[in-house]
Image: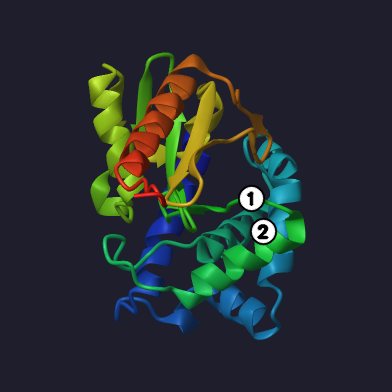
């Protein structure tokens, strides 16, 4: 698998150069980029990505086998490049700027597939946040969330971090590789409107919606909200 890991890294490096319009990249001299431009011209990128996801296991099996195919290797690389292009990440995560392409694509996916939320994945294959929420993974007595410089720091996120500290729940702010999602028993989203909402599934991974650590945080958050609301109570008879 070292061979595929190095290949993936090479494709990611080429993708970064391509997206940065680096003068070191001449599209006409790089076969992978020539193929990508042609795919874009015929609006076939989504088809290629769909094929890549379906056939990924078969492609990998061939490439790590005893008789790898150069043609299969080319399909693998262009499929991965197209997938990278489709992943979204904010240009400036800490500024609340409406990225119309990201929001439009997220809304389209949610509406057509009945998703509650779409998680954003950067070019390093790391989950950063939801299209309109912050994302947390739950360990047995700990939380993992993306570092502040990779996300929009929502108010509810800040409240969760404060409550976690008060409840002696460890919080790790670090990169969240897609590959580790299934290692965690629970996950949740935070936002101003929904508060804390548990996630039941992400793609093929299932999560508990009644994990004790999540329930402690949610109950503490709801209690805090109710206490704050009580400060603004109004008696019409006075």
Name the spot of residue 13 as percent of width and height, x first.
37, 59
Q: Nearer the viewer, residue 36 or 111?
A: 111
Q: Secondary structure at mark 1?
A: loop
Quarter of the rendering containing residue 221: top left
Q: Nearer the viewer, residue 29 or 205?
A: 205
Do residues under tags 1 and 2 come within 8 Å of each other at their CB atoms?
Answer: yes
Q: Which residue is mark 1?
A: 116
Name the spot of residue 207 as percent of width and height, x first.
60, 26
User: Would you say 108 lies left or right of 234 here?
Assistant: right
Judge whether 178 appears above or below 18 on screen. above
Distance Cα–Cα, label 1 vs label 2: 6 Å
Q: Nearer the viewer, residue 83 or 204?
A: 204
Q: Nearer the viewer, residue 58 or 118?
A: 118
Judge whether 236 appears above or below 226 on screen. below
Q: Which residue is mark 2?
A: 110
- Is residue 145 at least partly visible in the picture? no
Residue located at (76% from left, 48% from top): 54
User: Would you say 7 lies left or right of 141 here?
Assistant: right
Could you tell which of marks 1 and 2 lies nearer the N-terminus? 2
Name the spot of residue 15 as percent of width and height, x first.
43, 65
């Amino acid at each position: 698998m070292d061979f595929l890991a190095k290949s993936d890294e090479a494709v990611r490096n080429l993708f970064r150069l391509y997206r940065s319009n680096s003068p070191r990249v001449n599209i006409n001299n790089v076969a992978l980029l020539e193929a990508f431009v042609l795919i874009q011209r015929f609006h076939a990128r989504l088809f290629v990505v769909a094929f890549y996801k379906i056939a990924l296991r078969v492609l990998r099996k061939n490439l790590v086998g005893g008789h790898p195919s150069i043609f299969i290797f080319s399909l693998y690389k262009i499929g991965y490049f197209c997938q990278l292009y489709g992943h979204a990440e904010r240009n400036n995560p800490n500024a609340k700027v409406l990225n119309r392409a990201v929001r439009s694509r997220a809304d389209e996916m949610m509406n057509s597939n009945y998703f509650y939320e779409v998680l954003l994945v950067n070019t390093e294959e790391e989950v950063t946040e939801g299209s309109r929420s912050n994302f947390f993974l739950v360990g047995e007595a700990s939380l993992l969330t993306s570092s502040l410089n990779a996300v929009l720091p929502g108010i509810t996120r800040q409240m969760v971090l404060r409550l976690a500290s008060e409840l002696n729940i460890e919080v790790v702010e670090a990169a969240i590789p897609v590959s580790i999602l299934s290692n965690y028993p629970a996950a949740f989203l935070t936002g101003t409107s929904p508060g804390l909402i548990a996630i039941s599934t992400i793609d093929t991974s299932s999560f508990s919606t009644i994990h004790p650590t999540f329930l402690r945080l949610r109950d503490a958050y709801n209690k805090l909200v109710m206490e704050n609301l009580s400060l603004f109570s109004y008696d019409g008879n006075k």
